[in-house]
């Protein structure tokens, strides 16, 4: 009986000893990370979108500097936006740009506007480009546009240069990441910045001109976007002017 008990203890001790040896030898092993095999800016962009899907604007950390993205966004707008719209709205945009709280509030508003759509859009990152060259290209395009419009001698030239310098200060080392989605908004562009080795998302847009890495949306995509909730047009209706519709047309006015 004693011999049997001793043999049982021996049979248990051997596996335990082997386990201890294996554990000791495995301390120096490198365990593969479960993170996707993508560069950090694309991982940060996808993580941000996943966070927005769950928590909307709570994914934006208070105190982060978004002025660099706002400066780049203004340069992109000056380079490809409506000239009339630029002349009408630019003063207000520059006033808002000078206030960090208003800049961050605009980013929060943009995220909240698209949060519901992003939850079902199935977006994946497809490419990224460094912000530095994009900033210079946007500034050069904006200046060339001023020349074509005969406005190169106005104060807008200095505004463009100031925005270019500010964008470089905050975004150099960062990237603009493109995410393609199966559904509205179809494309999302997220700006990242490197803050002390930590990659954070500091800006967002859903449109980018082809010359800067975007593309021209298809007609069907435009139709879906115009009827989507983020643009605020899904529940809108146009006013019916009396006499504008022939009373003999074979459909009710309500269906127009």
Image (cartoon, rainbow, N blue to C red):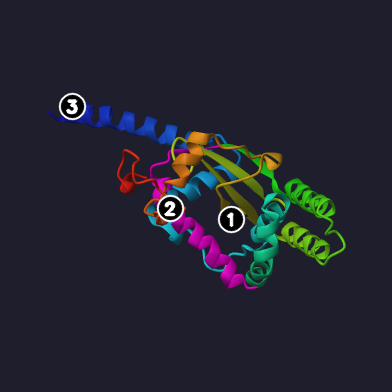
Work out how far the residue at label 1 is from the one at label 3, CA to CA, in angstroms: 74 Å
| Front one among 13 and 100 | 100
Q: Which mark is residue 113?
A: none
Labels 1 and 3: the sequence-earlier one: 3
Residue, x 60% and y 44% (percent of image)? 177
In the image, the segment drawn in magenta is: 98-125
- Secondary structure under the numbered disc 2 in the rendered image: loop
Work out how far the residue at label 3 is from the one at label 2, CA to CA, in angstroms: 86 Å
- In the displayed image of the protein, which residue is found farthest to the right? 153
- In the displayed image of the protein, which residue is found farthest to the left? 1
Q: Give the x, y percent position of residue 158.
A: 82, 65
Quadrant holding the C terminus:
top left
Left or right of 139: which side holds 8?
A: left
Q: Which residue is mark 2?
A: 233
Q: Residues within 10 Å of mark 3 (few under 14, many from 20)?
A: few
Work out how far the residue at label 2 is from the one at label 1, CA to CA, in angstroms: 24 Å
Question: Compared to 38, does 133 lie above or below?
Answer: below
Q: Which residue is mark 3?
A: 3
- Secondary structure under the numbered disc 1 in the rendered image: strand
Q: Residues within 10 Å of mark 2 (few under 14, many from 20)?
A: few
Residue, x 63% and y 73% (percent of image)? 99
Q: Give the x, y percent position of residue 113.
A: 45, 56
Location of residue 21 by image quarter: top left
Q: Which residue is mark 1?
A: 203
**In this orientation, does residue 223 appear?**
yes
Q: Is residue 119 magenta?
A: yes
**In this orientation, does residue 32 appear?**
no
Q: Residues within 10 Å of mark 1 (few under 14, many from 20)?
A: many
Left or right of 120: which side holds 7?
A: left
Q: Give the x, y percent position of residue 197.
A: 64, 54
Which one is in front in this view, the residue at disc 2 or the one at disc 1?
2
């Amino acid at each position: 009986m004693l011999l049997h008990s001793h043999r049982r203890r021996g049979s248990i001790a051997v596996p335990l000893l082997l386990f201890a040896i294996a554990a000791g030898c495995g301390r120096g092993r490198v365990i593969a990370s479960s993170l996707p095999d993508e560069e950090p800016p694309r991982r940060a962009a996808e993580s941000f979108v996943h966070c927005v899907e769950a928590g909307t604007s709570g994914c934006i950390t208070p105190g982060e500097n978004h002025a660099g993205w706002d400066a780049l966004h203004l340069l992109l707008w000056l380079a490809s936006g409506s000239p009339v719209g630029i002349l009408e709205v630019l003063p207000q945009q520059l006033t808002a740009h000078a206030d960090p709280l208003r800049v961050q509030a605009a980013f929060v508003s943009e995220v909240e506007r698209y949060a519901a759509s992003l939850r079902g859009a199935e977006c994946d990152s497809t490419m990224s480009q460094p912000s530095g060259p994009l900033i210079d290209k946007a500034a050069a395009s904006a200046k060339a546009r001023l020349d074509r419009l005969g406005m190169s001698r106005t104060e807008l030239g200095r505004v463009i240069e100031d925005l270019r310098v500010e964008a470089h200060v905050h975004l150099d080392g960062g990237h603009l990441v493109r995410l393609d989605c199966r559904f509205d908004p179809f494309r999302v562009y997220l700006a990242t910045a490197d803050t002390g080795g930590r990659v954070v998302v500091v800006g967002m847009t859903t449109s980018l001109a082809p010359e800067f890495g975007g593309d021209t949306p298809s007609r069907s995509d435009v139709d879906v976007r115009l009827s989507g909730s983020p643009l605020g047009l899904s529940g809108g209706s146009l006013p019916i002017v009396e006499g504008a519709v022939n009373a003999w047309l074979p459909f009710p006015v309500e269906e127009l």
